[in-house]
């Protein structure tokens, strides 16, 4: 009995050590090309506070803020076009355990400092999703949450992404 109790305590202590473990995770983000006026899709390293939750955190981090270190004379704002525009990607599982990715476009608004359109921001974010998820995306459901009106072109862009083979780059420009 004493051995069982000690083993339980050791197991509980070990589980506690790893429960909130953070680490660096790689994802891909659509970045503002700053002076170039272009959207740049690039791999980035993020501090992931729930790193042991696995692959789905890389999906949510596609739309996370990205304020890089700089030697500029003034502070640099968020360079991630997805987060600066109000896009949010999230991953959940349905009752059958199948992955569901939701692109929330309800808060979508392109700041004046960015040189892209709403369609480019959505398309670039979807291409980042394709690169992060890879073939796993074929087994997932993708949904878009849109405003009640005014985002019909975005719905068409999402539908085109869903129909396209996931092993080929998405033509987002």
Image (cartoon, helix red, strand yellow):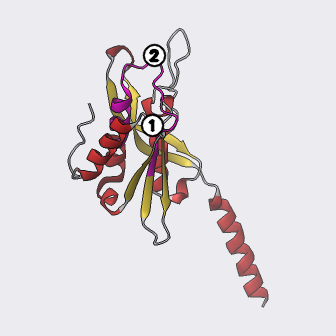
Mark closer to the chain start, 1 or 2:
2
Tell me the mark number nearer the camera, choosing from 1 and 2.
Answer: 1
Secondary structure at badge 1 equals loop
Residue at x 36%, y 23% (from the top left corner): 116
Image location of residue 144, percent across then percent down: 42, 47
Residue at x 20%, y 47% (from the top left corner): 168
Q: Is residue 106 magenta?
A: yes
How many marks do you count on the picture?
Answer: 2
Q: Residue furthest top?
A: 73
Q: Residue furthest right?
A: 2
What residue is disc 1 on? Answer: 149
Image location of residue 45, percent across then percent down: 45, 39
What residue is disc 2 on? Answer: 113
Image location of residue 88, percent across then percent down: 49, 41
Q: Is residue 19 magenta?
A: no
Q: Residues within 10 Å of mark 1 (few under 14, many from 20)?
A: few
From what the image shows, is residue 97 above or below residue 168? below
The stretch of residues the image draws in magenta is: 102-126
Image location of residue 162, percent across then percent down: 29, 51
Q: Nearer the viewer, residue 67 or 165?
A: 165
């Amino acid at each position: 009995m004493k051995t069982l109790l000690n083993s339980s305590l050791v197991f509980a202590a070990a589980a506690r050590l790893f429960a909130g473990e953070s680490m660096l995770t790689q994802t891909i983000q659509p970045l503002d090309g700053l002076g170039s006026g272009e959207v740049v899709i690039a791999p980035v390293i993020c501090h992931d506070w729930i790193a042991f939750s696995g692959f789905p955190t890389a999906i949510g981090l596609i739309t996370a803020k990205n304020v890089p270190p700089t030697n500029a004379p003034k502070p640099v704002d968020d360079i991630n076009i997805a987060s600066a525009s109000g896009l949010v990607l999230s991953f959940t599982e349905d009752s059958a355990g199948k992955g569901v990715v939701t692109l929330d476009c309800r808060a979508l608004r392109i700041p004046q400092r960015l040189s892209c359109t709403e369609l480019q921001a959505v398309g670039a974010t979807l291409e980042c999703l394709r690169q992060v998820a890879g073939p796993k995306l074929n087994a997932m459901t993708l949904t878009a949450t849109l405003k009640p009106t005014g985002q019909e072109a975005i719905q068409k862009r999402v539908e085109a992404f869903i129909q396209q083979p996931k092993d080929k780059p998405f033509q987002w420009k």
